[in-house]
Image (cartoon, rainbow, N blue to C red):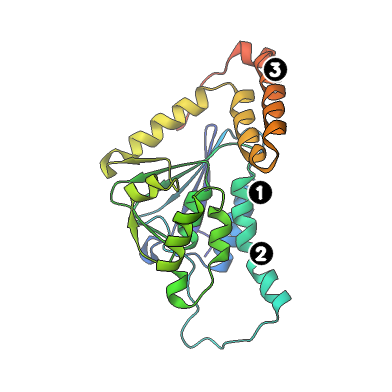
Amino acid sequence: MTDAIRAERKGGVYAITLNRPEAGNAVSDSMIVQLGDHLEAVDSTVRVITIEGAGSDFCVGREPPPPDAPRKQMEALELRRAHDIVFRAYGLVRHARVPVVAVVRGRALGFGFALAAVADITIAADSATFQIPEFAHNIMPTMVMSALIDRVPLKALMHRVYTAEAFGAEEALRIGAISAVKPASQLDNALKSLLEQLLAAPTPALLAVKEFARNAQAIDINKAVEYARALHAVINTSSEMRRGSKIEGMD
C-alpha cells in the first residue's frame, strides 16, 4: 500500500493526496502512520501543505477490520499506544509550522472529517457531506472530538456526535468546521487562487500567523495580546518583510 498516500513537491507547496479512490480513501493504520511520516518530512523550504482525496471522496474514515479477523481484547495501555498514530496525525497537522489547506470533495466521515477540520483552512465543494458516525456504532468518538474541540462550538459538536447525522457543506461552514464552500466545478480554481495568495505573502508573516493561531488560544487573553504585540513588532520591522516575497511556482 505504498502508493495509498502520495506526497509531492509543487514549488513551495507540499501536496498530500489520500489515494484509495476505490475505497472512498478509507485509511488503514499503516496509511495513518504514512500520513504522519509525510507530515514530519516537510522541510523548511515548504510554505504551504495541502491535503486532498483522490477521486470523488475526501476520506470516509478509518478502514474497518475484516469481518473474519480475530478479535483481541487489548489492555488499556496497548490500546492507547495503538491509537496514538491517530493523535500523532492530528497533532502534526495542528502544529505544522506552515499553513495546512484541506480540500474536500464528496464524503468526509469520522477520521476524514477530523482531518479536514483540523487543517488551518478547509475549502469544501457544495456537494460535500460530513459526519461523525462513531456513536451510531457504539464507539466513543473522543479521538475525532479532540481534533474538533477548538474548531467547532461545543453545542454544535455535541449535537453532531450524539446524533451521528450526516450534514452538508453549508452546515459545516455555519458551525465553523470548514472555511469556505465552493461549487464543485470551481474547487480547483479556488485552491489555485488561495495558494497564489499564500505563496505571495512574505514568509515571516506566513509563519507568524500560523504560530499565533497555534499558540494564542491556549494562553490567557492578556498574555495573548502581549504575544501579538511582540510578534507584530518583530515581524513587521524585519528586512524580509520589507523585501517582500516572490511567488513560487506550483507546477
Q: Amino acid at mark 3?
A: Ala
Q: Are marks 3 and 1 in contact (CB under 8 Å)?
A: no
Q: Amino acid at mark 1?
A: Glu
Frontmost residue, 32 versus 249? 32
Mark 2 sits on what residue?
Answer: 84
Question: Badge 3: how crowded within 10 Å, few (<14), some, or many (20+)?
Answer: few
Q: CA distance from mark 3 to mark 2?
A: 38 Å
Would you say 102 lies left or right of 204 here?
left
The local secondary structure at tag 3 comes to helix
Mark 3 sits on what residue?
Answer: 233
Q: Amino acid at mark 2?
A: Asp
Mark 1 sits on what residue?
Answer: 40
Residue at point 64%, 44% (across, down): 95
Front tag of 3 and 2: 3
Is tag 3's residue or tag 2's residue first in the polypeptide sequence?
2
Point out the image quarter for the C terminus: top left
Q: CA distance from mark 1 to mark 2?
A: 15 Å
**60 is higher (above) or lower (below) than 212:** below
**202 is higher (above) or lower (below) than 68:** above
The local secondary structure at tag 1 comes to helix
Question: Badge 1: how crowded within 10 Å, few (<14), some, or many (20+)?
Answer: few
Q: Position of residue 250 (x, y in %)?
A: 46, 32
Frontmost residue, 78 versus 245? 78
Is tag 3's residue or tag 1's residue first in the polypeptide sequence?
1
Would you say 73 lies left or right of 21 here?
right
Is tag 1's residue or tag 2's residue first in the polypeptide sequence?
1
